[in-house]
Amino acid sequence: MSSNPFDSDEDQGTASGEILEGFLCPICRADLKSIDVLTDHFARKHAEEEDTLKSVFNIFVKAKKKILNNFEDERNGAAAGSSSSSTAAGASSSANGNGADQRVLSNARSRFNVFNYMSKQQVGAECSHFEYFQSVRNPRLERYASETNKLIIRLHRLLKDLPTDSVQRKQHEQQTVAWLDGTSVKLCPSCAKSFHIARRQHHCRLCGGIMCNDCSKFLALENALQLASLSTSRSEPMQHMHQGDSAIRLCEHCLWLLDTRRDMHESRTCRPLLVQVYEQIRQLQKDVTPDLDMYLKIINSLHEGETIFTIADASALRGKIGQVAEAMDMRSKRILAIYCEPGSREESLKKAIRLSCIQAIKERMLSLPPLPNEAHIQQIQERKRMETEQRILTEQRMAMEAYERYGLGATTIQSGGGLESGTFAQGSDLQSINNWSAPQASTSTSKSSLDDPLIEQINIIKGYIKQARQDMNFEVVETLELNLRELQREVYERQRKSQNSAAASPEVEQQQS
Amino acid sequence: MATTPRSGGAGSGTAQRPNGTSQNKSCQFKLVLLGESAVGKSSLVLRFVKGQFHEYQESTIGAAFLTQTICIEDTVVKFEIWDTAGQERYHSLAPMYYRGAQAAIVVYDIQNQDSFQRAKTWVKELHKQASPNIVIALAGNKADLSNIRVVEFDEAKQYAEENALLFMETSAKTGMNVNDIFLAIAKKLPKNDGANNQGSSIRPNGNETNRPTNNCCK
């Protein structure tokens, strides 16, 4: 560079030469002696500066107000003597001679102001580290899994035909797993004690590693067999012949791997009593739900005056629901009786289970409407029957009137048709009338025509209904009953037609001619 | 060498001004130094402003304020330098100082990996909280000790490039790159709005009128 670019401004000469240091306000450059005083000062005096920068005058007014406020507040604070820091700060600033505006209130106040000044921070950039986590975790898991599998395979081979004789056994062990050469190993790798006559080298039977007797771990042969059979679907039965020195010498690491594997296996397969009982409760609850709905449906249908279900059905179902409630109650009590540490999370879990059971029983089962009174139901049914009869009568009468108006022509046929249309149009309401009239019809016809397939079918369905009632399968009962009604109506219609046809046919012929 | 800074004599400035009174542009920039404690922020500033170096520089309390004026071409650039204290307990003060700053030098020590990490977090904080168009320079200080360095030049260079920072390795002790880094900042700073600030009514936050209010935290 040809010219010296550094040049101190003569106007600012004194300022640039001087180095200010301390708790400087970045705007008025006053030294405020402590962090709290500075932050408070900055928050109070310069917070709104950005908004009012355009008007210097405005700032002045504001600052003046602030200062006055400060003065007031500060004097109040000092009078109350509430905060030691305020007085200390006040003393320091007055010593500085900077005036009252730099005084502060208590620490808490100033901190509050700092937070006020700093606007809320936004949530910064975020990213998922799950993939990284997996990429770290998977290789680790794989490593342990493969290591453990290797050990299990070796253990399996080791146990396959383990000789009872100790010399042969050693040979077999060395054949299965190559032992490390111990000539250069002077210290035990795990406890760092030197080997000598009294502390001899030993080998891990699974990895061949060297350790001293103190660092060796032993795996009982029975446990070893169990572990080996875990992986080989118990291909060989327990060998009970090795009763002698029935343990396998292992290093700590191999034993740990095997132990971990066993623990994992147990935790995966074992289901504590609590879980079992709780699952039973859940199953009961699940099973009883359709029964509850069904019961409500039956009660409703009874109150409607329908005759698909009987009161006996309702009471049987109610009894069944009561039994389930009892079973749930008993099981939840049993869960509560399982021992656990008082005050533990397990205890609170058990209490919660019990509570939810009680609640479920109360809400779903005890709140069921009571069985209707038999006399009452009969009354309803009677009234309903009367109503329908009445309606049929009026319909018939109206039909008759209509025929009279159209002329006396095909009266009989039409009246039959009128009745027929009324029967179908009324739908479910008329099922009840069929119900009490159809059996008579069917009994009368069954005597006359036993070979009628419809009658046969009716009888079969009746049998089914009986069975379904016994099994308390009320949904099936419902559909079967409806089927039965239809069949009965069909029979009834046919019967009446055959009765009518004899009388009607000449009239039809008459009309045609 | 021409770039050797003078020891800040007050009177001698006028004689060496290259263009005399003909220069018509002057601007003023607020510059803040950030970084972990004991990386050499104060030494860097002292070298730049006064050309001095103290082997046993005391640690800064609160913050230090210095000014230095340099000339680039026909512009007089006045730096108002806020040298913050690096100690953790003063961290809460830093936003006050970098608020409204047009330039920042984030300093780390090339012998100290932690200070480099800290510098990265400072850069992150500046990007988040400071003025959006702030010019940030990364200074790897104590370059005279590069034989026992821990932070590699290329590593820091790459980081600086990724984050669009000016980057130099400096040494306050030898003066290496000290002036250059300030010069580089001055060149990178926009000068046009500096003309408005000319005159007696220059305010430290003068340039803030140009940027939307309150956007540092929002």
Image: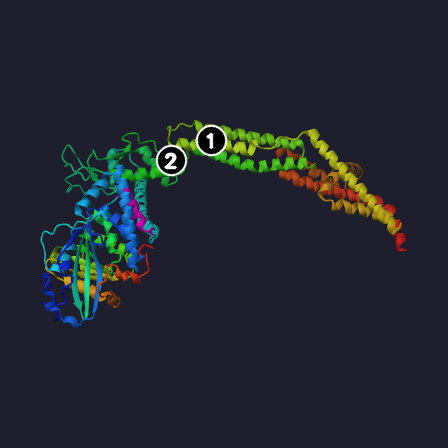
Q: Chain of mark 1?
A: A
Q: Closer to us: mark 1 or mark 2?
A: 1
How far is disc 1 from disc 2 in space, using C-alphas? 44 Å
Q: Label 1 belongs to which residue?
A: A354
Q: Quadrant of residue B176?
A: bottom left
Q: Label 2 belongs to which residue?
A: A237
Q: Earlier in the sequence, mark 1 or mark 2?
A: 2
Can I make out residue A84 in this image? yes
Kindly identify the residue that appears in the image at 88 percent across and 55 percent down. A512
Task: Please give left or right for residue B139 compared with residue A248 in the image.
Answer: left
- In this rendering, is residue A350 above or below A503? above
Kindly identify the residue that appears in the image at 47 percent across and 31 percent down. A355
Q: The C terminus of chain A is located in which quarter?
A: bottom right
- In this rendering, is residue A398 above or below B175? above
Can I make out residue A176 in this image? no
Decide which of A224, B192 is in the foreground and name it. B192
